[in-house]
Amino acid sequence: MTAPIAIIMGSQSDWDTMRHAADTLTALGIAHDAQIVSAHRTPDRLYGFARGAKAAGFKVIIAGAGGAAHLPGMTAALTELPVFGVPVESKALSGVDSLYSIVQMPAGIPVGTLAIGKAGAVNAALLAASVLALTDEALAARLSAWRKQQTDGIAARPEGAA
Ligand code: RP5
């Protein structure tokens, strides 16, 4: 069976960020398939992946890219699956370029845009998990447990306070 979630990224260099999405999905017991798909360098691979993603059995696509980050938007243009975009922190502009490239989609083709960097990658995975949990009670229970564990791990007072 195909993994329900695809994690695609524009470059090997994005993996340091996108692995946090993969780790979060693993922690929730959700199978995923990570692939390098560049809108600029491998446009044919992008077309093949996005056009075939639904038929391949994917339910949600997480797409991370940096700089002139066309990957999430182009992917969303080619499939009706939900696409969550993660702006990867770029060297030149600290990911603000990535964020603007992904978030400012003209009306008609949506990309759910997350925060720049690791936080965005983790939250993309959690958002994808929430979508799948709508029709998967066991996953919904695992997601609730994950959130409870997070809540339980937050101290009432900061260490070092008087
Ligand atoms: C984008 O260009 C990738 O998503 C990556 O964030 C950025 C830089 O890629 P590399 O030059 O590191 O391969 O397409």
Image (tube, rainbow, N blue to C red):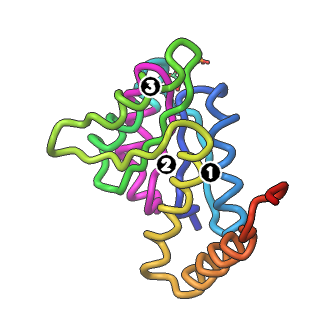
- Mark 3, residue position: 96
Q: State the CA–CA distance, disc 1 to disc 3.
A: 20 Å
- What amino acid type should be assigned to the residue bearing mark 1? Ala
Q: Are marks 1 and 3 in contact (CB under 8 Å)?
A: no
The picture places residue 144, in percent across and down from the top left corner, at 59, 80
Quadrant location of ligand 1? Answer: top right
Whole-angstrom CA distance, mark 2 to mark 3, is: 19 Å
Q: What residue type is labelled 2?
A: Ile
Residues under labels 2 and 1: Cα distance? 8 Å
Write the residue at 62% across / 73% down.
147
**Proximity of marks 2 and 1: CB atoms separated by less than 8 Å:** yes
Residue pointed to by mark 2: 62
Q: Where is residue 91 in the image (x, y as percent from the top left)?
A: 59, 16
- The residue under label 1 is 21
Mark 1 burial class by Cα count in 10 Å: few <14, some 14-19, many 20+: many
What element does badge 1 sit on?
Answer: helix
Query: Which is nearer the eye, 107 or 147?
Result: 147
In this image, 105 relative to 22: left or right? left
* Mark 2 / mark 1, whichever is N-terminal: 1
